[in-house]
Image (cartoon, rainbow, N blue to C red):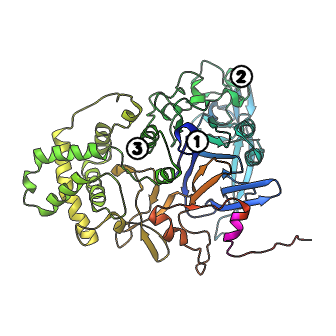
């Protein structure tokens, strides 16, 4: 799952008159890339947050004065160049009025179970590596980061920054991969930048497609300074969110609209939908709360409300009126219709209606097929309405779609009964968080196809033999930071911070926090942190 949430609230929209920042990347819970929680107090370096194993700085988190978050998305930082190959010598490509040589490189790749490495030959043009050959043409990737080495220096700047302006010095290095970066400081500022190392392209070419590599006219003209990028300091709305969307959907009446800068700085093709279920829900929450408290902020971080569920309930009731007569004596159908109609839209672990809604929507998708189900999804949902923007088109539901929705309710609740022993099963009977042989019920999820993509993002694995689905990705290092003086923060890792099965920290987070939708204080200040030390190890310097 390559998605994330982040939002920031200005002091005048909070109860404590200080900024609040949500940091919520969604990644795998397993493997070398997973995030680890830590605190650091070393000389002038003080921080709390999460980072990749081996990182010496806070990756996402805060220091004494500044907090920062990132979500995937950003400007266009790479291009593909189309090269014409020499028919007499296919290792040459045309450039201006001459032929240039492709440089060959031999790469050895060791494969498990094979005694000798395999050798692969790759080719480089002056643009970059060849990624595809097709007939007499080759396609080269030109990457803005190919020769850059200051990524770590950016995080040095972030970790030692005393305010947003100093934090921006790290962004000015132009080393971050395309990211939506938010920061807040204890002075009361909130800031956003659509960051990335962006080449300056010549006008008159569509760099969203492969461009002609046979002429110097399409060559890059340098790198845009960070000041050229889409960014905003202290928006008038007093809040902003970016859950992997374009800047124009970050808030109601966002000033960061396409067309104000070069298209590749905006980074999305024309027609991109600037809202989805998670992002629209974030706007709905933040725009509707003029006094966010720390308690509400923690609640919003794990919100499991399924936006627009009511539109689907309305469509189901309409379908029932027209095609439900054949199910009048079907007690499971009638009970499911009643429960879903009374549902509040929250996928709580103890909600039977939420599980019925899931099985119904899954059956709709199966009976319609992917293409038709996607069309139905676009007809019913109206996420852009949260941004006060009209849908590009509206279409009534067809009789076939309505009939399928009624039939799918009967089929869905029947499958639910079969899989879980009855129609009273609850969401947490099917959706779990745990490790090895132990798991606990959990609410929320990233069930996009079923219309249950909540801010509490959890990527569930495929169903096990007992028809349960266990979380394996999603919220991996959720943090709520209150930019008071001193700073306060809370975290919620998904499983546990130890990989030793006999450790009390092997799955304690899943049991005590994640399954309950709770967050724990970080005890960030050193004197507070030392009150909660479980074990201590003094490391001696090596020779």
Reading the chain from its start, which is encountered first: label 2 or label 3?
2
Q: Helix or strand or loop: what does disc 2 sit on?
A: helix
Q: Which residue is mark 2?
A: 216
Residue extent of the magenta highlight: 528-534
Residue at 64% over, 29% down: 229
Taking 140 as reference, is 356 above or below it? below
Mark whose residue sits in front, 1 or 2: 1
Task: List the single residue furthest toward the bottom.
Answer: 502
Residue at 53% over, 37% down: 240
Q: Does residue 462 appear left or right of residue 319 in this picture? A: right
At label 2, counting other C-alpha atoms closer than 10 Å, the crowd grade (few under 14, some 14-19, many 20 or more) is few
Mark whose residue sits in front, 3 or 1: 1
Residue at 39% over, 29% down: 388
At label 1, counting other C-alpha atoms closer than 10 Å, the crowd grade (few under 14, some 14-19, many 20 or more) is some
Q: Main secondary structure of the magenta part?
A: helix
- Image quarter in which the C terminus is found: bottom right
């Amino acid at each position: 799952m390559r998605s994330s949430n982040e939002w920031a609230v200005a002091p005048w929209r909070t109860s404590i008159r200080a900024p609040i920042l949500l940091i919520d990347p969604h990644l795998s819970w397993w493997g070398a890339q997973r995030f680890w929680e830590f605190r650091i107090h070393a000389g002038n370096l003080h921080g709390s947050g999460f980072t990749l194993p081996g990182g010496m700085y806070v990756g996402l988190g805060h220091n004494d004065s500044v907090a920062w978050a990132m979500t995937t998305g950003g400007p266009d930082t790479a291009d593909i160049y189309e090269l014409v190959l020499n028919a007499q010598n296919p290792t040459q490509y045309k450039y201006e009025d001459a032929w240039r040589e492709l440089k060959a490189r031999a790469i050895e790749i060791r494969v498990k179970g094979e005694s000798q490495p395999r050798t692969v030959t790759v080719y480089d043009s002056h643009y970059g590596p060849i990624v595809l050959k097709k007939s007499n043409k080759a396609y080269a990737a030109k990457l803005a980061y190919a020769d850059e080495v200051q990524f770590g220096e950016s995080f040095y700047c972030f970790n030692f920054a005393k305010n947003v302006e100093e934090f921006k010095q790290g962004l000015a290095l132009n080393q971050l991969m395309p990211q939506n970066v938010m920061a807040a400081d204890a002075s009361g500022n909130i800031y956003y930048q659509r960051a990335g190392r962006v080449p300056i392209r010549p006008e008159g070419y569509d760099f969203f497609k492969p461009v002609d590599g046979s002429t110097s006219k399409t060559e890059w003209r340098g790198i845009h300074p960070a000041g050229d990028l889409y960014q905003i300091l202290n928006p008038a709305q007093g809040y902003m969110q970016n859950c992997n969307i374009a800047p124009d959907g970050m808030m109601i009446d966002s000033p960061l609209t396409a067309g104000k800068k070069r298209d590749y700085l905006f980074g999305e093709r024309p027609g991109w939908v600037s809202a989805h279920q998670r992002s629209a829900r974030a706007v709905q929450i933040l725009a509707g709360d003029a006094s966010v408290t720390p308690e509400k902020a923690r609640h919003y971080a794990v919100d499991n409300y399924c936006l627009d569920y009511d539109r689907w309930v309305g469509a189901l009731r309409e379908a029932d009126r027209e095609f439900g007569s054949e199910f009048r004596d079907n007690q499971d159908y009638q009970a499911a219709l009643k429960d879903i109609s009374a549902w509040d839209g929250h996928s709580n672990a103890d909600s039977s209606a939420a599980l019925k809604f899931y099985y119904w929507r899954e059956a709709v998708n199966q009976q319609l097929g992917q293409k038709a189900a996607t069309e139905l999804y676009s007809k019913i949902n109206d996420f852009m309405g949260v941004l006060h923007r009209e849908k590009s088109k509206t279409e009534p539901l067809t009789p076939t779609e309505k009939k399928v929705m009624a039939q799918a309710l009967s089929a869905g609740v029947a499958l639910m009964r079969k899989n879980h022993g009855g129609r009273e099963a609850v969401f947490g009977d099917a959706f779990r968080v745990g490790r090895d042989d132990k798991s606990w019920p959990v609410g929320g999820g990233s069930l996009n196809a079923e219309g249950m993509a909540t801010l509490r993002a959890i990527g569930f694995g495929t169903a096990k033999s007992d028809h349960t689905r266990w979380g394996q990705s999603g919220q991996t290092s959720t943090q709520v930071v209150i930019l008071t003086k001193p700073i306060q923060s809370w975290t919620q890792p998904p499983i546990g911070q130890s990989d030793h099965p006999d450790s009390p920290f092997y799955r304690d987070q899943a049991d005590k926090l994640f399954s309950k939708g709770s967050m724990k204080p970080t005890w960030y200040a050193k004197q507070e942190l030392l009150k909660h030390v479980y074990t201590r190890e003094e490391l001696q310097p090596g020779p």
